[in-house]
Each structure stands twice: as structure tokens, then as C-alpha cells.
Amino acid sequence: MVRLDILSDPICPWCYIGKLRLDRALEARPTHPLAIEWHPFQLNPDMPREGMDRAAYLAAKFGGAEGAAQAYRAVRDAAAETGIEIDFDAIPRVPNTLDAHRLIHWAGIEQRQTAAVSALFRAYFVDHRDIGNREVLCDIADGLDLDAAMIARLLDSDADEADIRARDAHSREMGITGVPTFIVGQRHAVPGAQPTDLWIKVLDEMMAEGAGEDPQ
């Protein structure tokens, strides 16, 4: 198996697009050798814990709706090319994602990490839910067949908060400045939402190399 570490944030549209493109490559090559692990990276690490109104966020970050529309144009184009539509105007709040990253971490302990990432992307970009809200996160956990009552207790504590922040900080110290970032085999960093065709090529090369190895 080849390890694929993915640094991502569940409110990052490029991360959502990048995951969908990777998913299609994995579906096309079901015997792929990748073992995927997701890692926390907050786009807005200084976001208030309760999050903020999206209109206020856009005004602060882009100077308002017009600046935001320009900034998101490339994202909308990439989403359409990928075959999806993201209705940014329907997203009411921008959450703090610390608790969402904690849920991803706990789901990983139960071998449900990628499913949790998918559920969070869908909740935010498709269903327009506030994934900083702990009731929403517990509902997502329940949909993943996790113990929602246990998740609620963990969310009400500070469990693993320091670990998530430390892992995020470590990535920045290593030079990661944006997500998604894919690290293949703990050696090669691939930034950005790469096209499906590229991932298929990478997977084909991996499988060809694996098939050519001499048995030990």
C-alpha cells in the first residue's frame, strides 16, 4: 500500500472539488494501492468559535459581494467542469471548523474517516448546514453509525483540541500554505484540486511499479 496524506478543511471548496476528482479516479481503478489519511488544516484558524454570518465574512475578506464573486469565479468554473454546482449564496454561515476536524479524527479511530469527510462536505456545500454547530455534527456522526451520544460528550469537552491545533500548526511550519495538499508516499507533495486524469495516471504508474516488483 502507498500512503496518501490529504490536508484539507471541510469548508474549502477546492478541497471538495479535489476529493470528488480523486474519488472518480479511485472508482476507475478499484484495485488502487492507496491508503488514505486526512489531516486538519483550518482556512480560518482565527474564526470565532461560533462562526460568523457569511455576508459579514465576505465583506471582511473580499470587500463585499462583488469581490467575492470575482474570487469565487474560478471555483464555480472548476465545480461546473467537475459536474457539480455549489450554491455559495445559500450558505448562511462560515463556521469555525475545529470541531469538524475533531469529528474527522474520531471517525478515523472507527475507520470512518473518509466517510466523515464526505459527509461534512455534503452537509456544508450541498445541504448548507452549519458544520460548526455541535448538534449538526452529532447528527452527521449518527449518519456515519458512530455513537452520537459519545460524540456529543467529546464535543462538550476539549478532547483532542490541542492535538488538532498542533497538527495544523505543524503543517504550516512544514511550508503548507493552502489546501488541498496531497502527500504521496510521505515524499511527494501535490498541491491543489488535481484533475481525475492525473490521478488515474499516478495510480496506473503505482500499480505498474507494484506489478513489476520481485516477490520477496
Image (cartoon, rainbow, N blue to C red):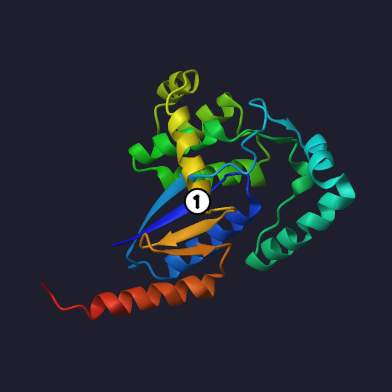
In the structure shown, which secondary structural element does the residue marked by tag 1 occupy? Answer: strand
Percent x, y of residue 83: 65, 64
Tag 1: Cα neighbours inside 10 Å, few (<14), some, or many (≥20)? many
**Which residue lies under the disc numbered 1?**
7
Q: In the displayed image of the protein, which residue is found farthest to the left?
A: 216
Task: Give the residue drawn at x 55%, y 55%.
Answer: 180
Task: Give the residue drawn at x 67%, y 68%.
Answer: 81
Q: Is residue 11 above or below residue 129?
A: below
Task: Give the residue drawn at x 43%, y 29%.
Answer: 160
Name the side, left or right, on which 8 lies relative to 71.
left
Q: Quadrant of residue 49?
A: top right
Does any portion of residue 144 appear in the rendered image? no
Percent x, y of residue 96: 63, 33
Question: As rendered, which of 45 and 84 lies closer to the eye?
Answer: 45
Disc tally is 1
Which quadrant of the figure contains the C terminus?
bottom left
Task: Give the residue drawn at x 52%, y 34%.
Answer: 140
Q: Is residue 93 above or below residue 115?
A: above
Q: Is residue 144 above or below residue 37?
A: above
Does any portion of residue 79 appear in the rendered image? yes
Percent x, y of residue 91: 73, 40
Q: Is residue 105 above or below residue 115?
A: above
The amino acid on which the numbered mark 1 sits, given as a three-letter code, is Leu
Which quadrant of the figure contains the N terminus?
bottom left
Percent x, y of residue 59: 84, 40
Question: As rendered, which of 146 and 68 lies closer to the eye?
Answer: 68
